C-alpha cells in the first residue's frame, strides 16, 4: 500500500506492525498461559512507534497526506496486531480510541500532556462499563472534584498508565475524565477469570476517592456519546476481530497443507472460511473509509459491519474446529488460543439490537449508497 503523496508514509505503520507480528504472537502464548499484564508486548508496540502513530500531529503522531490514508493504515495495523494476538489488539484499539478522543475534545494542555506520555512510551485506555450505581463526580464547596465508583471490564487495569473513564456529574450527562490507571491498590483482577483474552486484564478499577482537577475533565458533558462518532467507531474493534479471523484461517490453511488438502469435504469447508473472512474484510475496509465522513449513515454502516464480522467469526470458528479436529481444542495449540480469544471478543454489547438498528436504516434507504434503483 502506497501513500497518494508518493512518499510511502501511510505504509510505514503497516510495515512496522508486520515486522513485530511474529514476536507478538510468540509473546501472546506466554501471557495466555500465565495471565499477567503483557508488558513486553506493549514494549514491542512502543519500539515500533505504533503507540503514537495515530495521535494528532501536535502530540507526536504520524502525518498522513489524506484522512483516507490514515484510516486505511489504522485498519491494517489493527488487524495485523489482532492477527498476532487479540489481547494486544484489544489494548491497542482502546489506546487508539483514547488518542482520537483527546485529539477531538482535548485542550492544548491535554494534547501536550499526551505528547509527553507518548514520548515516555505510555498507554491509554477507555473505560465505560461499570457496575451500579456507576461512577460519579462529586464537587465540594471549594470546587474540588472527587470520583466515586468502580469501572468493570477495564482492559489493562493496573498495567496501562492512563484511562479515559466515563463519569456522571451531579447534574447533566456523563463526561470523560482522564485518570491514572496503574494504581495497584485500586486494581482488582480477581473477577477476570476468562477463557479467552486473558492478557487484557479486564478487571475492576476502583476510582472512589480519587481527586481530579479541571485539567482532567476532557471535553464537555455528552461528548463521548455524540453520534454518529460513538457508534461509527465500532469499526476499530471490528478490524481487530477481523485479524483474529485471519489468524484462524491461516492456522486452518497450514493444518490442511500438512495433511487434508486432498479431502474435497475439507476443501469445501476451507472455501467457506475464505469466503467469510474476505466478506468481513471488505465490510471493515468500507466501514473504516466511511467513518471519516462523520455522516449519520456511518453509524448504521458500522452496526451492520459488526454483525457481518460476528457472523464471519462464528462461522470460521466452527469450520476450523471441524476441519482441524480435536487439536483445535488442545491446550498450547495456537488455534485453540485464537478460538478462545475470538469467541470472547465477539461478545460485544447487544449484537441483536445493533443489527436491528442497522436493518431499520437499510429499510429506509440503501446505506451502502450505490443501489438507489432498488428503493
Image (cartoon, grey):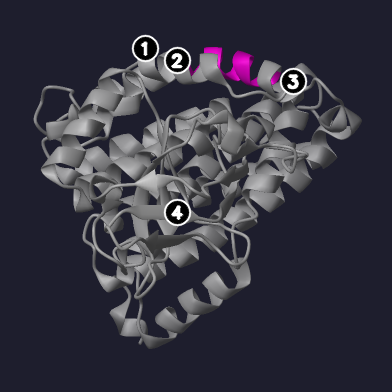
In the drawing, what numbered circle is on residue 47? Answer: 1
Judged from this view, the residue extending furthest toward the front is 141
Residue at image mark 3: 34
Q: Could you classify mark 2 by the number of other residues whose Cα lies within 10 Å: few (under 14), some (14-19), or many (20 or more)?
A: some
Residue at image mark 2: 43
| Camera-side mark, 4 or 1 | 4
Q: Where, quadrant-wise, is the C terminus in this rendering?
A: bottom left
Vertical comparison of 104 with 17: above or below: below
Left-right relation of 34 to 161: right
Question: Quick one: 247 or 103, which is closer to the camera?
Answer: 103
Give the CA distance from mark 3 to mark 4.
Answer: 33 Å
For residue 161, which quarter of the picture? top left
First in sequence, mark 3 or 4: give its number.
3
- The residue at 61%/52% (across/down) is 312
Question: Quick one: 125 or 166, which is closer to the camera?
Answer: 166
For residue 187, which quarter of the picture? top right
Q: Position of residue 128 (x, y in %)?
A: 49, 56
| Camera-side mark, 4 or 2 | 4
Q: Could you classify mark 3 by the number of other residues whose Cα lies within 10 Å: few (under 14), some (14-19), or many (20 or more)?
A: few
Tell me if label 1 and label 2 are in contact, CB under 8 Å: yes
Give the CA distance from mark 2 to mark 3.
Answer: 18 Å
Q: Where, quadrant-wise, is the N terminus in this rendering?
A: top left
First in sequence, mark 4 or 1: give its number.
1
SS class, disc 3: loop
SS class, disc 1: helix
In the drawing, what numbered circle is on residue 147? Answer: 4
First in sequence, mark 2 or 3: give its number.
3
First in sequence, mark 4 or 2: give its number.
2
Q: Position of residue 314 (x, y in %)?
A: 69, 52
Give the CA distance from mark 4 to mark 1.
Answer: 34 Å
SS class, disc 2: helix
The magenta-colored residue range is 20-29
Amino acid at each position: 500500500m502506497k501513500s497518494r503523496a508518493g512518499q510511502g508514509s501511510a505504509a510505514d505503520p503497516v510495515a512496522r506492525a508486520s515486522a513485530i507480528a511474529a514476536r507478538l504472537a510468540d509473546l501472546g502464548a506466554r501471557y495466555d498461559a500465565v495471565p499477567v499484564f503483557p508488558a513486553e508486548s506493549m514494549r514491542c508496540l512502543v519500539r515500533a512507534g505504533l503507540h503514537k502513530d495515530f495521535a494528532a500531529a501536535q502530540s507526536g503522531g504520524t502525518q498522513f497526506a489524506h484522512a483516507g490514508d490514515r484510516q486505511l493504515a489504522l485498519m491494517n495495523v489493527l488487524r495485523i496486531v489482532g492477527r498476532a494476538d487479540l489481547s494486544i489488539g484489544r489494548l491497542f484499539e482502546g489506546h487508539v480510541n483514547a488518542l482520537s478522543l483527546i485529539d477531538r475534545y482535548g485542550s492544548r494542555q491535554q494534547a501536550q500532556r499526551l505528547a509527553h506520555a507518548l514520548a515516555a512510551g505510555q498507554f491509554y485506555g477507555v473505560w465505560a462499563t461499570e457496575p451500579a450505581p456507576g461512577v460519579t463526580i462529586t464537587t465540594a464547596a471549594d470546587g474540588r472534584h472527587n470520583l466515586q465508583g468502580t469501572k468493570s471490564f477495564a482492559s489493562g487495569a493496573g498495567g496501562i498508565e492512563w484511562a479515559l473513564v466515563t463519569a456522571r456529574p451531579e447534574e447533566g450527562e456523563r463526561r470523560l475524565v482522564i485518570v491514572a490507571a496503574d494504581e495497584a491498590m485500586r486494581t482488582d483482577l480477581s473477577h477476570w477469570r476468562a477463557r479467552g483474552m486473558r492478557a487484557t486484564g479486564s478487571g475492576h478499577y476502583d476510582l472512589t476517592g480519587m481527586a481530579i482537577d479541571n485539567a482532567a475533565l476532557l471535553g464537555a458533558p455528552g461528548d463521548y456519546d455524540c453520534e454518529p462518532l460513538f457508534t461509527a467507531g465500532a469499526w476499530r474493534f471490528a478490524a481487530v476481530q477481523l485479524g483474529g479471523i485471519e489468524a484462524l484461517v491461516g492456522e486452518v490453511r497450514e493444518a490442511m497443507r500438512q495433511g487434508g488438502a486432498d479431502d474435497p469435504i475439507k476443501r469445501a469447508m476451507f472455501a467457506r472460511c475464505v469466503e467469510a473472512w474476505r466478506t468481513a474484510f471488505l465490510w471493515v475496509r468500507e466501514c473504516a473509509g466511511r467513518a471519516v465522513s462523520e455522516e449519520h449513515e456511518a453509524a448504521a454502516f458500522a452496526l451492520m459491519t459488526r454483525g457481518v464480522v460476528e457472523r464471519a467469526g462464528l462461522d470460521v470458528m466452527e469450520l476450523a474446529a471441524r476441519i482441524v479436529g480435536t487439536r483445535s481444542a488442545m491446550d498450547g495449540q495456537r488455534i485453540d488460543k485464537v478460538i478462545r480469544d475470538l469467541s470472547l471478543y465477539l461478545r460485544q454489547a447487544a449484537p441483536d439490537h445493533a443489527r436491528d438498528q442497522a436493518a431499520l436504516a437499510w429499510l429506509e434507504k440503501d446505506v451502502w449508497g450505490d443501489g438507489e434503483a432498488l428503493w
